[in-house]
Image (cartoon, rainbow, N blue to C red):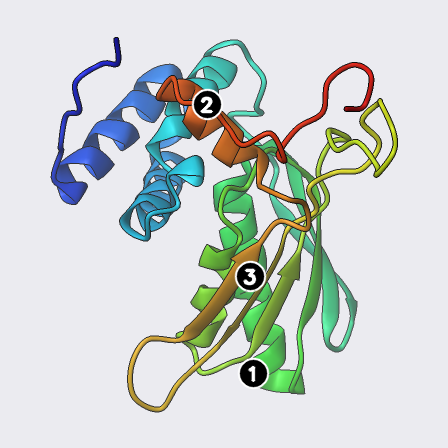
Amino acid sequence: MSEPLVYVESNRLRQLMKDKLVKAGLPEEQADKTADLLIFADERGVHSHGAVRMQYYSERTLKGGYNLKPNLRFEKTGPASGIYHGDNALGHYVSYQAMKKAIELAKTSGIGVVGVKEMGHSGAIGYYVRQAALEGMVALTVCQSDPMVVPFGGTEPYFGTNPIAFSAPRKDGSPILFDMATTVQAWGKILDARSKNKSIPDSWAVDKNGA
């Protein structure tokens, strides 16, 4: 028997998530940005990257899985490029700051390319390209992930879901936004199904024999 659905207004949910992250030990500014991104996903129906992730983030924070006092720094490597060092902080705030640096570079050089090192999970990466599109820029973001995808014909995980996102501004209306995993489905979709006790299509996964 499935649990009854509970509907919560988005601003209320955002505050609840922020409060939970702060209580777990995450600095308020980082908790605020993380909650904002989770709401961004949920409001667009991408529940695999929304509130369903809260338990994981808060538990990992409590267990010391993130650096709660990171030394975040930007290392410029050229006129239009740089590396943002996340120092093992939760990825939402790190990625947001890294995109801000990319936008700054693009405003002065015409293009900005920023790599990010040492950060935790960064959520729906469409959030960051939209961040640039709202500044009137075209943006592309790619991200690696841990090996969890079995190659065609294989039996063991080898590839990551390796998401990619793109956004571009429009003269009238919200930016064009594209965000996808390069696999049959995003891992978060499986987590979402599990949290709701729902089955998944047989095309989403393989058994120990690769079937």
Mark found first going from the N terminus, 2 or 1: 1
Foreground residue among 202 and 105: 202
Query: In the figure, is residue 153 to the left or right of 121?
Result: right
Query: In the figure, is residue 44 to the left or right of 67?
Result: left
Which residue is at a point 35% across and 91% down the rendered structure image?
171
Q: Provide residue 135's location: percent of width, then percent of height.
A: 43, 77
Number of the front mark, 2 or 1: 2
Q: What element carries label 2?
A: loop
Pointer 3 residue? 99
Foreground residue among 112 and 206: 206
Examine the image and state in which quarter residue 142 appears. Answer: bottom right
Pointer 1 residue? 107
Residue 175 numbered tag: none
> What amino acid is labelled 3 in the image?
Met
> What amino acid is labelled 2 in the image?
Ser
> What amino acid is labelled 1 in the image?
Lys
Q: Provide residue 97's location: percent of width, then percent of height.
A: 52, 54
Q: In which quarter of the image is the N terminus?
A: top left
Which residue is at a point 49% across and 58% down the rendered structure image?
126
Residue 200 lies, with reference to residue 176, above or below; the image says above
Pointer 2 residue? 199
